[in-house]
Structure formats: C-alpha cells, structure tokens
Image: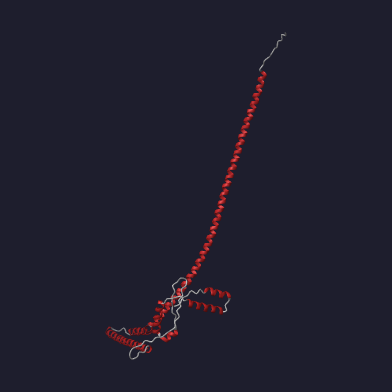
Amino acid sequence: MFNDSYDIDVSTRPLAEKMSEITQQVGHTTAAVGVMETAVIAQERSTAGQICGKLDAGFFNVVMSQIAQRVANESAQAQALAVELMQQQKALLNLQSRMTGDYNMISARYAKLFSGLNQELKNRVTELDKPLMQYCTQNVKQLENRIYGLVSDVPVLQSESLGATQAIAAARLKSNAQKLIDNVACYVMNDQQQQHTTQELLFPADADAQQPTVYYVPVIIDEENAEGRTAVLSLKENPQLHQQLGDAAYLRTVQTLTEATESMQWVERDETIANVANSYMEMVEKAGLPPRVRELMEKMFDAQFKTL
C-alpha cells in the first residue's frame, strides 16, 4: 500500500480574471447592441419616412392624374357644347335672316295690295263724287275770292257814311248769294235732266212698260291661296268695258260681280285638271327649254287647283 499525499491549491483569481474579461466583453457587446439598435431604429425610421414620402407622392400624383383626366373630359365636353351652340347660333341667325326676308316680302306684298285697294276705292269715290268735287275745286275758290274782294272794297270812312257803305256791301253779298243759289239749282236741274236722258238712252222704255236689257260679258276669275294666307280676290280695271258701259253701269257691274264671286264654290273636276295638265305639258314640250328648266317646270306643276 502506498501512502501518497497531494497538495491542492484552490484559487478563484483566474476565474475572477476571466469573469472580469467576460464582463468587459459583455459590456462591449451590450454597447454594440445598443449602437446597432439605435442604427436599426434610425434606418427603419428613415426607410419609413421614405416609404411614406413615396406613398404621399404617389397618391398625390394619382389624384392629380385623375383630376387632370376629369378636367380634360370636362374641357372636351365644354368645347363640343360650345361648337354645338355656335352651330345653333348660326342656324338661328340664318332663320332670323330668312324670316326677316319673308316678313319684308309679305309686308311689301300686302302694302302693294292695300295700296291698290286704296287707289281703287279712291278712283271709285272720285268717280261717284266727280261733279261735286269739280264744283268744289273750281268754283268755291272763285266764290271765296269774290266774297273777299267785295268785303275788301268797304272803305274806312267817317261814321256818318260807314253804315250806308256796309248796307251796300251787304246788299251786294245777298244778291251774289241769290245768284249762286239760282246757279246751283240750275246745275242740279240740268244734272238730273242729263241723268234722266242717259237712263232713257241706255234703257229705252216702250209705251207699256220698261223692259230691262241683259248684256253678257265674259269674265275670268282667278284666286290664289299661297303660304297659308287667305286668298284675296281683286278685279282689275277694264278700260274698254268701262268706256262702253259708262261709269254707273260699270260700277254696278263690278259690284254685282264681286258679290257673286263671294258665294261661288270652288270644286275639283278631274276632266278639267287633266285637260289643263295636258295643255301645260304640251306647252312645256314645245317651248324648247333646257332639260333642267323643263324638269323643274314639270315638278312645280302639282295640279292642285279648282274651278267654278
């Protein structure tokens, strides 16, 4: 058996040194981790800021793009509407110009028509009152001049002879007035005698009774109804008939014809329309007109007319 002895020296100094070194390393590691954490947080914040900035810029660009697209659409619609309004304005101006021309044409036509009616009425009134108007225009002025001449002959004298002078002037006026009345009566009597003589010559009477004489005069009646206006029937002057019948008979004939035409009824006759159409087409064919004018004249003939 061996009896050995061992000396064991137990010391904690190396461990303490190692622990101190480890502590330093852990401190360095902790500091590095802290620095790294700070850098990571800063990097994350920077990245988040950049992402947010890009998101904001992208959203702003998207919104601006949508707004620009909508503005472009609205601008295109506004331009199209403006072009349409300009076209409508031109159409309205053309319509106004055409309506103005139609109004001027219709007003000129009616003015000419009423002017003709006024002239016709004036001529008729003048013919009816022709003797009286001639008397007034020719004799009344002469009588007024004579009266003024007689009055102007009264002198301005003394009061003793003024009364006698005025009495003489009044007597002369009464005498002239009496002569004027006699002349008027003579004129009326002669006029009545002339009318009676004319009546006897135009309508002679036999011993038993006066038989009326009938005369037949051809008359053409033409009435036009255009553009929705009521047709106006006018009778034109016929100098030859007027000269043959005389004033009274001619006016009576025109009045009777006017009253008769108001009660006449226009009717459509197929035979008359066919005859007129054939005559019209024959006249167009024989006229030797250009083809375009001939076709236009054939199109304008619509056979829309009536006869009595």
**Looking at the image, residue 171 lies above or below residue 38:** below
- Looking at the image, the residue that sits furthest to the bottom is 207
**Looking at the image, residue 26 lies above or below residue 48:** above
Quarter in which the C terminus is drawn:
bottom left
Q: Quadrant of residue 245?
A: bottom left
Q: Nearer the viewer, residue 281 or 94?
A: 281
Is residue 153 shown left or right of residue 232?
left
Q: How is the image coloured?
A: secondary structure
- Looking at the image, the residue that sits furthest to the front is 271
**Residue at image x 66%, y 18%?**
13
**Looking at the image, residue 37 lies above or below residue 144:** above
**Looking at the image, residue 70 lies above or below residue 224:** above
The image position of residue 76, as x and y in percent, is 56, 55
**Residue at image x 55%, y 58%?**
80
Figure disc tally: 0
**Residue at image x 54%, y 55%?**
77
Q: Nearer the viewer, residue 73 or 52?
A: 73
The image position of residue 130, as x and y in percent, is 38, 83
Quarter in which the N terminus is drawn:
top right
The image position of residue 242, as x and y in percent, is 42, 84
- Looking at the image, the residue that sits furthest to the right is 2
The image position of residue 301, as x and y in percent, is 52, 74
**Residue at image x 52%, y 78%?**
278
Q: Nearer the viewer, residue 262 or 184?
A: 262
Q: Nearer the viewer, residue 12 or 225?
A: 225
